[in-house]
Image (tube, rainbow, N blue to C red):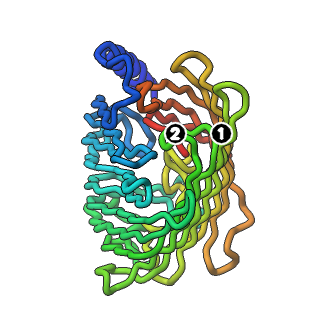
Amino acid sequence: MLRYALYICFFLNLIFFCQLKAQQTEPADTSQKRFHWTLLPIVYYTPETGLAYGAGGAFTYTFNESIRPSQSTFGVVYTTLDQLLLYVNYRTFWDADRYLSYGEVGYYKYVYSFYGVGDDALLSDEQLYKVNFPRVRTSLLFETTTNWYFGGRFAFDDYRIQNVEKGGEVTGENVRGGRGGITSGLGFVTNHDSRDDQFFPVKGWFFEGLFLPHVYFLGSDFNFFKASADVVYYQPLKERMLMAINLYAESNLGSEVPFQQLAMLGGPKKMRGYYEGRFRDKNALILQAEYRWMFWKRFGMAAFADAARIGGENKTFLSDQTHFTGGAGLRFQLSKSSKLNLRLDVAYTDDEQANFYLTFGEAF
């Protein structure tokens, strides 16, 4: 852990120096620019990836007659756990904001830990496995009323499990999808977005509702239905302070839900502190709250607390066991124009685990 802490300190200074040099070349007034790009070295650390490094960029643009800005990001990343991540994310408005498209296209060579399904999954049951998969997520929506969008989504993963620790549960007959497989879904998605800023909101609401059937005739190896609701509320407090609250619910219906598509706790965005997938089941309900304060120029801090329940369909929708995490972190705004934050968090779990996260952007 000390070695990674030294890496983090070194790369924080490196990124800070690169950003200072980039700011010296930026024009004084970029308010009239309809296209802005930023290229940055990518360096981050999460428990799932170890130390990750590479290159990437962000393109912020505005089409004629549109008010809301659009953004595309891309990256090529390699990690100390021998992982490779190639991805492009985008969120685009056009035709006076009447249409919205967003999604992700990527290819990932990854290493995951699997602990089992349900609340009784133990840390001692951890099993590592390697997987390669291409991923496509694309949504196309049109505005129905002010700030409300409705449309469709297509999702595709080709999950190719390459290597599993011997004697592990992932390869067992009791784990659906333990030998990999394709998940392909086509369904409906709706958005409500009244945030004051797309990338660094201080006030307003965001809501995404999803109903996504995965069926055989779309090429899926599994037949099941995924439904989710993601709600975020931003409330400004004093100057440069805000409270962000996130409620997320997910349910997977059917007897063929593969383990990689189950609702999961953990990772850098949902229930920080837990390894991603530390707990997983068909259903999940997650509540997160975070206090944010940019206390001096481009430097800030945050404190957060989270609670969640998971559950299967054999007993009740959700179990009686509640999982808790919490922590605090620092922020540095990398670019005044795009308001992209570098985030360093330390998070603790109710089973006395602690994890560090050094990454870009807020959790929600």
Left or right: residue 126 compared with residue 192? left
Marks 1 and 2 close (CB-CB < 8 Å): yes
Q: Could you tell me which quadrant the N terminus lies in? A: top left
Kind of residue indicated by mark 2: Glu
Q: Can residue 170 be seen in this view?
A: yes
Percent from the top left, x then y, of residue 17? 34, 14
Closer to us: 68 or 46: 68
Q: Which residue lies furthest to the bottom in this view?
A: 217
Q: In which quarter of the image is residue 337?
A: top left
| Disc 2: which residue | 362
Residue located 35% across and 39% down the image: 60
Is residue 143 shown above or below 51? Answer: below
Residue located 56% across and 64% down the image: 145
Percent from the top left, x then y, of residue 149? 50, 63
Percent from the top left, x then y, of residue 348? 62, 39
Kind of residue indicated by mark 1: Glu
Percent from the top left, x then y, of residue 264? 53, 60
Give SS at disc 2: loop
Is residue 199 shown above or below 190? Answer: above
| Disc 1: which residue | 290
